[in-house]
Image (spheres, coloured by chain):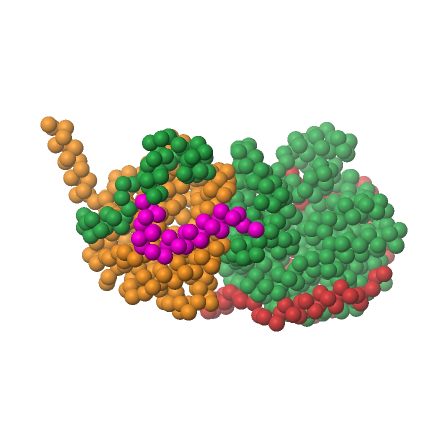
Chain colours: A green, B orange, C red
């Protein structure tokens, strides 16, 4: 069992038993789901929207080289720079080198899962550059030195009292837990940052090939400030984020908003490409896009799983997942959480280390049903399990166990005998009161369940006896 | 029409009443029902755990056993799903791939058979109790059954169907998930049990006996008043059977 | 340092090309292409309805002159301080009315100051489907629609298009996408629900978005 797996089990046990935490999670997730339900109703046909989004993403990914090259050329035509990074180290290296060479002391960041994935924050800190998260939820968890809790709501596990105490300690000029005042305090603190930072770093929700622009979907306005005020703007995105046409956003903007927060569309959908033009009032003097591979091209090569790269990071699968709803985001211990995280992480970070995430699911399929770009999420979990058996470490007892199972299942006689043994073992365990002890044949089952009564005879015995007659 | 019964392995070993009640209802509707004795398992336990190499021969054997069946009925949404939706992928490189697709077309979950093939909503049942329905995941999302089991329940005389909150939420069984991740499975199961209790139902039913086995163990551990009963267990009850039972009790009392 | 030719680029492209030799399976479309969004029939009414939902103040006036006067009333209701205005011939004309009570900072002088109480701009389009305002860098710059607590947009019904499709087609066709380094589709005022999922208006962007929509 890997370290990551052990840690996951430990955290899962802790969170499953924490009824308070489960209640908070339940409330937040229910809220998200209710909003998404009403959001879907605004579409004449939500299923048609999903299908069309799936098709556009399919087109983009199955012609990825073409669209990335088009994007790159258009960005260059606009006077911007494009850097292709094979991995986290290269991406961080490019950004830190750029910052140092341009005399950058402070960086403001708007929310980016990719920046988390490459651990950009620590890389900047290492070279002495101050790095400030400006998305309110991220700002909060950064002050607490925690990882974000949820793809869309990083601070959803905290109450206003928690946040008020945090702000009082770290910001000083606040003495209430009124959400309005808390937001205003954050705004004041971050305003100073926006106007003093030399570099703004953002992610990108979409890389628009035909326009040579990145698209950012937000509500707060911090991404707009990050990408407009500092003199250098760096956007970092996975290579899979490219879409063919600006026109495609007429569909993706409402779909992303609906699936992410239930809104018809978010407050700010920003398009930016290249540095400011000579006649513009303001804007950055330099524009850089870092395209990150970091395992994505390998996933691309797996045609069965290429659709995992369709993901638009909406978070709907997290809200649909009963496992997520029970244990919460931190339990996963990875950048990407919930169903998409469980599908993706073994491919980005190693199957052996992270296979447990694919097993930590009842395969209910709620995620697949809700995904706006029609990724077959729960089927991919099954495929990850298949791969784990083929090429990763599985417990020896499990491997042997299924060999025995297979042998037993290939004969009616052995099958019936296996059933007879099972019933006999259960009867003995019951009469000797072994339930819950080390000799309990049902093992972990007895933790949560009263034992089932062992029937005297199997179905086939009863059928045989009466030939099915009543 | 001759029906071949596909009895899930754990039903055969541990919940034979599920199979008996299923036969009872189908025969009452006039169907000729047979049980191919050679059957063992559809292979789902190995498949779900990633052991596709071990699941494959078991699946191929299943197809041989049911090869000449006219119609196959199975009292389990998850086992039906395995055969119809997953055999094609499991057997993609097998010489039995076409057979898998062919058999997949003639296998039906029990309530699915009644609604979509027999096209019967009223099977002459009587069960004067308050009942809530758990939407088992495979039946709901892979077989697309939502209203069909409810329609069958609505036609049961005396039955009051109540909805519980989060009826579509997974009960947490998930096969080996229940033992490998017992803490999460238990939490999900207890959430489901709590929702059943809140609904005011006396019984919780479903298309999937595996869910019910899990929920039942949890309800009894909680000393809950709610009891589990498989769908065919309800549909097998008739007014005359109820009268006979009542009559037997009256006779006893009179003595 | 900021080079685009690099070994990594070649390696990544090579891997992508090798990866794509095998096409991926995809979900089949429904037999008939289905309408995704119900068509917008009454654009003005729809725009007003959406504005009410997303909390944009939409004030319909008979003509642009009337809009300019109405702006004066709004300015009277906000705290004293600079007003930043997009430098265009038309707004220059209207400013004569406003500059009596307010000091005006023009976009040609630079981006809006932190102390600005309001910004006033034109727009590239209004979108009925979502009750949105589409601005570009040409509308007084990037800061114009985000820095101050109040953002006022002066528009006419000619700029109103039915849906997002039409809005994006329009800015592409008119060359607005190529001559600007920045566009933003604004829908309502900035907001966040990051604290206990409670909606708070006015996060980093303006707290009030006001659209004066003249019919002529």
In the image, residue A311 lies in the stretch drawn in magenta: no
Rendering coords of residue A23 (x, y %):
53, 35
The reply, left or right, for residue B248 in relation to residue B12 is left
- The reply to whether residue C104 is in sight is no
The reply, left or right, for residue A126 in relation to residue B72 is right
Q: Is residue B156 above or below residue B94?
A: above
- Classified by dominant secondary structure, the portion drawn in magenta counts as helix
Picture quadrant where residue A174 is located: top right
The reply, left or right, for residue A461 in relation to residue A435 is left
Magenta highlight range: A393-420
- The reply to whether residue A312 is in sight is yes
Q: Nearer the viewer, residue C65 or C128?
A: C128
Q: In the displayed image of the protein, which residue is found farthest to the left? A: B255
Q: Is residue C93 above or below residue A6?
A: below
Q: Is residue A428 above or below residue B113?
A: above
Rendering coords of residue B55 (x, y %):
43, 57
The reply, left or right, for residue B34 in relation to residue B89 is left
Picture quadrant where residue A160 is located: top right
Rendering coords of residue B16 (x, y %):
29, 46
Q: Nearer the viewer, residue A169 or A301?
A: A301
For image coordinates 50% across by 38% down, the residue present is B183
For image coordinates 33% across by 31% down, the residue present is A431
For image coordinates 19% across by 40% down, the residue present is B242
For image coordinates 21% across by 45% down, the residue present is B238
Rendering coords of residue A197 (x, y %):
83, 47
């Amino acid at each position: 069992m890997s370290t990551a797996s052990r840690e996951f089990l430990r955290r899962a046990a802790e969170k499953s038993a924490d009824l308070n935490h489960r209640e908070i999670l339940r409330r937040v997730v229910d809220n998200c789901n209710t909003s998404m339900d009403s959001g879907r109703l605004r579409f004449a046909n939500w299923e048609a929207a999903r299908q069309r989004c799936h098709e556009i993403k399919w087109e983009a990914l199955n012609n990825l080289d073409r669209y990335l090259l088009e994007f790159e050329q258009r960005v260059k035509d606009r006077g911007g720079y494009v850097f292709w990074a094979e991995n986290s180290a290269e991406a961080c290296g490019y950004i830190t080198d750029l910052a140092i060479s341009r005399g950058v002391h402070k960086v403001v960041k708007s929310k980016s899962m990719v920046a988390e994935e490459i651990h950009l924050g620590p890389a900047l800190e290492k070279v002495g550059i101050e790095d400030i998260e400006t998305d309110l939820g991220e700002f909060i968890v950064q002050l607490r030195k925690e990882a974000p809790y949820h793809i869309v709501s990083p601070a959803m596990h905290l109450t206003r009292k928690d946040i008020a105490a945090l702000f009082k300690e770290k910001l000083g000029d606040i003495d209430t837990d009124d959400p309005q005042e808390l937001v205003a305090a954050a705004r004041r603190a971050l305003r100073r940052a926006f106007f003093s930072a030399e570099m703004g770093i953002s992610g990108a929700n979409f890389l628009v090939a035909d326009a040579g622009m990145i698209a950012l979907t937000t509500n707060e306005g911090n991404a707009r400030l990050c990408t407009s005020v500092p003199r250098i703007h760096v956007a970092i995105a996975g290579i899979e984020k490219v879409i063919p046409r600006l026109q495609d956003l007429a569909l993706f903007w409402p779909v992303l908003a609906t699936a992410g927060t239930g809104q018809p569309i978010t407050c700010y959908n920003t398009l930016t490409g290249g540095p400011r033009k000579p006649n513009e009032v303001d804007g950055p003097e330099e524009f850089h896009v870092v395209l990150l591979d970091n395992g994505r091209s390998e996933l691309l090569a797996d045609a069965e799983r290429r659709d995992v790269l369709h993901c638009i990071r909406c978070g709907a699968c997290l809200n649909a997942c009963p496992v997520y709803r029970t244990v919460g985001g931190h339990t996963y211990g990875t950048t990407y959480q919930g169903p998409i995280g469980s599908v993706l992480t073994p491919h980005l970070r190693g199957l052996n280390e992270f296979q447990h995430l694919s097993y930590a699911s009842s395969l209910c399929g709620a995620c697949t049903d809700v995904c706006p770009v029609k990724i077959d999420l729960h089927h991919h979990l099954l495929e990850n399990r298949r791969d784990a058996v083929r090429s990763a470490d599985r417990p020896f007892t499990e491997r042997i166990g299924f060999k025995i199972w297979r042998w037993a299942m290939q004969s009616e006689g052995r099958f019936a005998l296996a059933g007879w043994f099972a019933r006999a073992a259960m009867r003995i365990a019951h009469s000797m009161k072994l339930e819950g002890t080390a000799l309990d044949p049902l093992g972990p089952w007895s933790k949560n369940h009263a034992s089932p009564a062992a029937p005297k005879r199997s179905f086939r015995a009863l059928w045989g006896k009466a030939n099915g007659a009543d | 029409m001759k029906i071949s019964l596909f009895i899930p392995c754990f039903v055969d070993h541990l919940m034979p009443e599920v199979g008996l009640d299923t036969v009872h209802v189908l025969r009452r509707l006039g169907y000729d029902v047979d049980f191919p004795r050679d059957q063992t398992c559809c292979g789902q336990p190995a498949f779900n755990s990633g052991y596709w190499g071990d699941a494959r021969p078991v699946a191929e054997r299943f197809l041989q056993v049911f090869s000449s069946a006219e119609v196959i009925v199975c009292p389990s949404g998850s086992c039906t799903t395995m055969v119809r939706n997953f055999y094609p992928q499991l057997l993609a490189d097998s010489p039995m791939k076409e057979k898998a697709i062919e058999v997949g077309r003639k296998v039906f979950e029990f309530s699915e058979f009644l609604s979509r093939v027999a096209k019967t909503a009223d099977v002459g049942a009587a069960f004067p109790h308050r009942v809530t329905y758990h939407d088992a995941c495979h039946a709901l999302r892979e077989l697309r059954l939502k209203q069909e089991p409810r329609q069958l329940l609505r036609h049961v005389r005396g039955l009051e169907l109540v909805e519980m909150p989060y009826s579509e939420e997974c009960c947490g069984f998930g096969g080996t998930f229940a033992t490998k991740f017992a803490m999460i499975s238990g939490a999900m199961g207890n959430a489901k049990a709590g929702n059943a209790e809140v609904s005011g139902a006396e019984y919780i039913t479903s298309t999937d006996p595996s869910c019910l086995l899990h929920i039942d163990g949890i309800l009894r551990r909680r000393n809950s008043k709610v009891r589990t009963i498989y769908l065919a267990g309800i549909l097998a009850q008739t007014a005359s059977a109820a009268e006979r039972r009542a009559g037997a009790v009256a006779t006893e009392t009179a003595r | 340092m900021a080079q685009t030719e690099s070994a990594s680029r070649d390696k990544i492209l090579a891997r992508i090309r090798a990866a794509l030799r095998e096409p991926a399976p995809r979900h089949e479309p429904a037999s008939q292409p289905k309408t995704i969004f119900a068509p917008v029939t009454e654009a003005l009414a729809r725009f007003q309805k959406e504005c009410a939902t997303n909390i944009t103040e939409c004030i319909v006036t008979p003509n642009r002159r009337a809009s300019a006067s109405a702006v004066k009333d709004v300015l009277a209701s906000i705290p004293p301080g600079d007003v930043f205005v997009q430098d265009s011939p038309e707004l220059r004309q209207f400013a004569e009315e406003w500059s009596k009570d307010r000091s005006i900072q023009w976009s040609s002088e630079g981006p809006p100051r932190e102390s600005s109480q309001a910004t006033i701009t034109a727009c590239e389009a209004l979108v009925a489907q979502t009750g949105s305002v589409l601005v570009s860098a040409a509308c007084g710059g990037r800061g114009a629609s985000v820095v101050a607590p109040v953002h006022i947009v002066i528009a006419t019904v000619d700029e109103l298009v039915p849906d997002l499709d039409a809005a994006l087609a329009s800015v592409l066709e008119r060359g607005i996408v190529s001559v600007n380094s920045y566009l933003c589709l604004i829908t309502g005022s900035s907001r966040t629900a990051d604290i206990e999922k409670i909606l708070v208006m006015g996060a980093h962007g303006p707290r009030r978005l006001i659209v004066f929509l003249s019919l002529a």
